[in-house]
Image (spheres, grey):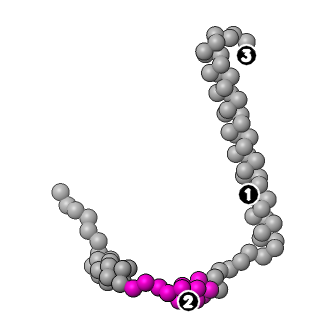
Amino acid sequence: MSSVSDSPAAQKGRQSDAGKSGDRRTGPLTFYRQVVAELRKVVYPTREQLVTYFFVVMAFVLVMIAIVSLLDLGLGKAVFAIFTGAEDV
């Protein structure tokens, strides 16, 4: 039976990263600077994109609400019919 192993590059990367995680703590000022630097990389959506995304998400949520509501109604009636023996529910 053969075992699957990581490539040499993956193993080397893992070994070099192993000692970095617990060596030093980041000070608050360095942390703040890193956060600001990362936020500068963010690409914010335009107003048009934001409106489009909003309507896409709202449509998806409404469709999911409809599906879950119909399943809830159908399963509720089925369970009610099974446990009460009602013929015309």
Q: Quadrant of residue 4?
A: bottom left
Q: Amino acid at mark 3?
A: Val
Q: Amino acid at mark 2?
A: Leu
Q: Quadrant of residue 77?
A: top right
The structure residue drawn at horizontal position 72% and vertical position 52%, both measured from the top left corner, is: 60
Q: Residues within 10 Å of mark 2 (few under 14, many from 20)?
A: few
The numbered dot on residue 89 is 3
Q: Nearer the viewer, mark 3 or mark 2?
A: 2
The numbered dot on residue 29 is 2
Q: Amino acid at mark 1?
A: Val
Q: Position of residue 58 (x, y in %)?
A: 77, 54
Q: Earlier in the sequence, mark 1 or mark 2?
A: 2
Q: Is residue 76 above or below residue 16?
A: above
Q: Is 21 left or right of 74, judged from the image as shown?
A: left
Q: Which quadrant is the C terminus positioned in?
A: top right
Q: Secondary structure at mark 2?
A: helix
Q: Secondary structure at mark 1?
A: helix
Whether residue 41 is visible to the viewer of this picture, yes or no, is: no
Whether residue 77 is visible to the viewer of this picture, yes or no, is: yes
Residue range corresponding to the magenta coloring: 24-37
Callout 3 touching callout 2 (CB < 8 Å): no
Gap in angstroms between the C-alphas marked 3 and 2: 67 Å
Q: Which residue is mark 1?
A: 57
Gap in angstroms between the C-alphas marked 1 and 2: 38 Å
Magenta residue check for 33 = yes
The structure residue drawn at horizontal position 68% and vertical position 11%, both measured from the top left corner, is: 86
Q: Nearer the viewer, residue 10 or 35?
A: 35
The structure residue drawn at horizontal position 77% and vertical position 70%, both measured from the top left corner, is: 49
Q: Which quadrant is the N terminus positioned in?
A: bottom left
